[in-house]
Amino acid sequence: MKTEVPAEIKATLPPSFWGKVLGMTPVVMTVIATLLAGLASSEMTKAQYQRALGAQQQAKAGDQWGFFQAKRLRGAIQSGTLDVMQLTTRENAIDEAGLRALAATLPKPEPSQQALNYLLAGRLPEFAAAPAFSEQVQAALAALDGDLTDPVEKQRIDAPKPKEVAAALKTAQEHARAFDRLMQPIVDGGDALGELLEPTTTQHPELGRDFAVLRLRYSSMRYDAEARLNQRIAVLHELQVRQSNLAAERHHRRSTRFFFGMLGAQAAVIIATLAMAARARNLLWSLAAAAGVGALLFAGYVFLFI
């Protein structure tokens, strides 16, 4: 965008300071209009980027919620199967000594014996509690369950910085992976013992029933714990999605207002040019100056506060 004042019009301008200012007004306003057009385009590009980022984060959140639901479903299946077994078979005391003796016959009995200790105790291994989120992240997560159109709720969601949410998400993911690593030896040890007690090959049907009861009970507990860990990850992904959408809306508003500012600056160019062409400089020049100053002030307000 380039504006040149014809020499014939320049010759009609008074050689005073204000005459020089009037001569420069179209050029300055053109520069301002170009700057505001660039800002409007930049903000629109950022809005499109945030929308695309939000879509990617929504896909991750959907995958994580699906993982959470799969864990919950597996836990419910284990619990339901255990209830059926207990209702349809005679309840006897678990033959702990027989299971331990059978585990000792394995080529590598230690993992199975360790797994059997946890299964018989009916408890998960000691594991560090999940790290607590910061107050801002906790408030933002709580706001996800509220009215997402409420300005106060939006402010709470947008309060934590994206880096803070990303750090909390990374911590939650590492915590879930640490739990998986802790459980893996117990799962492997139980599977090794379970292979000896398969219903089609075992010579110890009573021990097979006892081990099935123990493993169903323990698996239900494990899947419930894993589901809670995955739920923490999923809600943090949801928070990222909401923040990206809010950022996209904010950049879109800024783009629109920068565009209005550009229109004001272009109006100043037209008015100033008409002022010089008509040689009626007082009123039109004042209008041009007011339009230019208004465009600058409006652009500054958008840049700083929106």
Image (cartoon, helix red, strand yellow):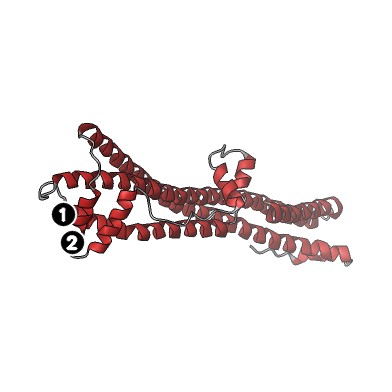
Asked whether 36 or 51 is in front, the reply is: 51
Residue at disc 1, secondary structure: helix
Q: 16 left or right of 142?
A: right
Say which amino acid is labelled 2: Leu
- The quarter of the picture where the N terminus appears is bottom right
Disc 1 crowd rating (10 Å Cα; few below 14, some 14-19, many 20+) is some
- Residue depicted at 79% across the width and 65% down the height: 10
Q: 258 left or right of 192?
A: right
Name the mark on residue 106: 2
Circles 1, 2 touching at the beta carbon (< 8 Å): yes
Query: x, y percentage for residue 18?
Result: 87, 63
Q: Residue furthest top?
A: 87
Tag 1 residue: 196
Residue 14 in view (yes/no): no
Q: Residue furthest right?
A: 16
CA separation in Å, label 1 and label 2: 9 Å
Disc 2 crowd rating (10 Å Cα; few below 14, some 14-19, many 20+) is some
Asked whether 31 or 98 is in front, the reply is: 98
Name the mark on residue 88: none
Question: As displayed, is residue 39 above or below residue 211?
Answer: below
Residue at disc 2, secondary structure: loop
Asked whether 1 or 292 is in front, the reply is: 292
Q: Earlier in the sequence, mark 1 or mark 2?
A: 2
- Residue depicted at 14% across the width and 45% down the height: 205
Query: x, y percentage for residue 67?
Result: 36, 48
Q: Which corner quadrant of the image does residue 114 belong to? A: bottom left
Asked whether 14 or 284 is in front, the reply is: 284
Query: x, y percentage for residue 88?
Result: 21, 32
- Residue depicted at 17% across the width and 54% down the height: 195
Say which amino acid is labelled 1: Leu
Q: How many marks?
A: 2
